[in-house]
Image (cartoon, rainbow, N blue to C red):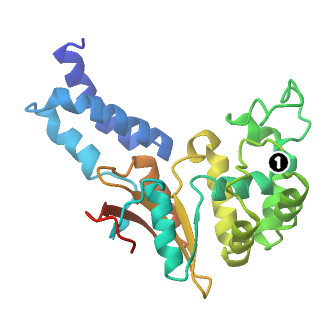
Amino acid sequence: MYEKTDIVAAANLLPVLWQQASNEPLQLSLQRIAKRVQKGVVNMPQWAALLTLLNDNASYAAPTSQMLTLSKNAELSVEQRVVEHFRAQGVSAFFCENSLLCGLFGLAFWDIIFAPIVGAFDNPYQRAPRDMYHSSFVDERRDLIDLRMVELKAGNYQAIEQHFATKQGISNDWVNWPLLTDSLLGLALQHFSAAFIVAVCQRILKDPAHYRSGQPDLVTFDAQGAVQFVEVKGPGDSLADHQGYWLSFLQQFYPASVCYVQWHETTSND
């Protein structure tokens, strides 16, 4: 059990640490700590500073949202029901939570991820090198990564297409084969801009452990190829901080929103 003086000290320190937080993972960690401390600082002078930390200093804008009312199907998840809804409107919709953007990264850098770096692999069955989620991953492969980025910036997706064709079914921490289908990848490479693919890869490389999660549940492509990312939230579900950061990032390139689903009381089809 923490002493009151410890809670007060933490409440005083958090706003200072926030100003010094240089990246999103650090900010998220501080937000989680602040929410825990929050219960102990109600009715204390430090509460005002902490409230500012939590509510006014968020480094991402609140994403746009939409409300959707659907009939419930016990055999389908809420995400699958939203996919059905979009497809009924003639839109190509895919459930791809963390699989599309991570998959693009994993395919684009497959040969680099599995490059024979000394000490990176102990056995041939590893899904990733030992330093995959450490800063040394980029440091040890800087030249290879830079060359691949040049290709991607030029719209050259040969590495992605080749690895998708030749590595089917092989384990890779970044590639979820059942969800990363040929049709999904084809639409992504056709309609995603090179600048977007490069930005996604750069973002993941900043902190692979942090950025490999929190990506939207769905991606859609309409008849004209317009892209939309959708985070689906069922009744009682709320947006997590790292999901908000991803939506904010994606909104720099394409529409990205939260879809809050509520159920019809009847079970009739839409």
Furthest toward the left, the residue is 43
Quadrant containing the C terminus is bottom left
Look at 67% across and 48% down and name the residue there: 205
Q: Secondary structure at mark 1?
A: loop
Quarter occupied by residue 161:
bottom right
Look at 84% across and 44% down and name the residue there: 170
Quarter occupied by residue 113:
top right
Query: Is 256 positioned to the left or the right of 208 in the image?
Result: left
Q: Nearer the viewer, residue 217 or 160?
A: 217
Q: Nearer the viewer, residue 99 or 266?
A: 266
Residue 73 at x, y percent in the picture:
42, 59
Residue 142 at x, y percent in the picture:
80, 47
Residue 94 at x, y percent in the picture:
59, 65
Q: From this viewpoint, is residue 173 visible?
A: yes
Look at 7% across and 32% down and name the residue there: 43
Residue 242 at x, y percent in the picture:
45, 48
Quadrant containing the N terminus is top left
Q: In the displayed structure, would residue 240 be above or below residue 66? A: above
Residue under pointer 1:
169
Q: Residues within 10 Å of mark 1 (few under 14, many from 20)?
A: few
